[in-house]
Image: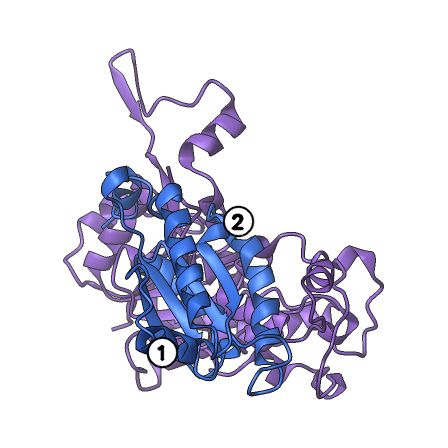
Chain colours: A blue, B purple
Amino acid sequence: MPEEFEPRIVAFFCNWCTYLAADLAGTSRIKYYPNAEVVRVMCSGRVDVQFVLKAFAKGADGVLIGGCHPGDCHYQEGNYKALRRYRLLRRLLRQMGIEDERLRLEWISAAEGDRVRAVINEMVETLRKLGPLVKSDAARAHLLEVA
Amino acid sequence: MKPVVAFYWCASCGGCEEAVLDLAEGVLNVADAVDIVFWPVALDFKEKDIEAMDDGAIAVSFVNGAVRTSHQLQMARLMRRKSKLVVAFGACAQLGGIPGLANLATAGDILREVYGGTAPELQFTDNGHTLTLPKLFDSVFPLDRVIPVDYYVPGCPPSPKIVSDMFDTLWNGQLPEPGSVLAPDHAMCDECPRRDSRPQELKLDRFHRVQERVIDPDRCILAQGIPCLGPATRAGCGSRCIAGNMPCTGCFGPTSRMRDYGGKALCSLASVVEGNEVAEIDRIFEGLVDPVGTFYRYSLPSSFLERKRLE
């Protein structure tokens, strides 16, 4: 299983910066791993912690949040709100046995198509080494114990 | 004919049983209005008495406690089969409750910690008599994870008002939508007696643990830097903790507009701090020493992740 494992990433990209960067990466024909499924949100500050937890619960091996650089938020400070949540959520995930590398917050401006490629490629490679979020068939079967 | 009801407890502390008795003389009205056929904490009926009943013979079963052993699972299924309505009574049955924090460990971890090298055998025969113990599951489950549940009564424990309203609703009123939580559907802050002292905008620069501060009894507790989960928690408790000058810890659980209580509670506290730099933000959150224990104190088994990751 380890050599065949392809991580699944759910990527929440803000409408004004990172989503445009991903768009730019596409129109510039920049190639990168196809493991990320992008969800466009109006702002990184819109990413409720529940979205991240649901992604992990529904099979994501990693979650990527992309927003505007500090100071550049279209809504003034949505990205700071995202940063505060992210710092606290990381600690909560650690207690739940989920490694820091599985949740990433990146500032990517509309001009940085190449940065989308770099971040996603890097995250895919990190997750390939880490392995799947659900570690074993036993762990998968466990919650069905009572079903 | 009086409605036939039953009470049962799974993984719980007994506080929910107290909550029924907390109706004080009101409990006599309940006892007059119904025919109680099963209530292990108070009455001497046995499991086999329930097994002997027709399916659906019980009008309502009130089940408190989470499910974490094979016997509790079997009893939950039995109560479901014999009852027209099942009410998940209290935070443990509704969300997993305090015992749900055991989902940070496994059954093996717990047995090793408690019994050292001598975990009890599940079966033991002596002199021709065989004794059995139920199996302890690796995880704690809320009641609706193992059987369909008709109504939920929140709280650790449910407040007397919530309990008497529940009896009124079940006997006298029109039954609400199946799956309803029998409590108001707005935030606890809306009913907080200190509501007017909450600043329009909060920008905390640190959190304090409750034992580190003398809390001003007239001011919003959150504004004093004590984590209070009123903004994320369902109302209906009567603000008993606030009246005791203690912060809300979230026992009434989520409103209908949330799916994962702890995730939303985390968002609510993260939205009242200042700090734009990683180092400063981390310093502010240092005062929250146990994020899972703070945000999922009563609801870890009903969260999206349900438990700590397993090998």
Identify the residue at the far top of this view: B127
Tell me the residue that label 2 is attached to.
A94
Up-down relation of residue B189 to residue B119 (above or below): below
The extreme left residue here reads B54
Badge number at residue A23: 1
**Residue A95 to residue B162: above or below:** above
- Residue A113, given in percent of the width and then of the height, sits at 42, 72
Q: Residue at x 42, y 74 (%)?
A: A13
Residue B212 in the figure: left or right of residue B81: right
- Establish whether labels 1 and 2 are both on one chain: yes
Quick one: SS at disc 1?
helix
The chain letter for the residue carrying disc 2 is A
- Across and down, in percent, residue B266 comes to 56, 66
Residue B104 locus on image (x, y percent): 48, 44
Choose between B226 and B195: the one closer to the eye.
Answer: B226
Where residue A145 appears, as percent x and y from the top left, is 26, 44
Is B73 displayed left or right of A24 in the figure? left
Q: Is residue A112 above or below residue B138?
A: below
Question: Would you call the spot at circle 1 few (<14 residues within 10 Å), some (14-19), or many (20 or more)?
Answer: some
Q: Which of B256 and B84 is in front in this view?
A: B256
Q: In this view, does A18 lie above or below A33?
A: below
Q: Is residue B4 visible?
A: yes
The one nearer the camera, B185 or B47, is B185
Q: Give me the residue at 56% from left, 72% from top.
A: A82
Name the disc covering residue B270, or none: none
The amino acid marked with disc number 1 is Asp
Badge 2 marks a residue whose secondary structure is: helix
Quadrant position of the N terminus of chain A in the picture: top left
Label 1 marks a residue whose chain is: A
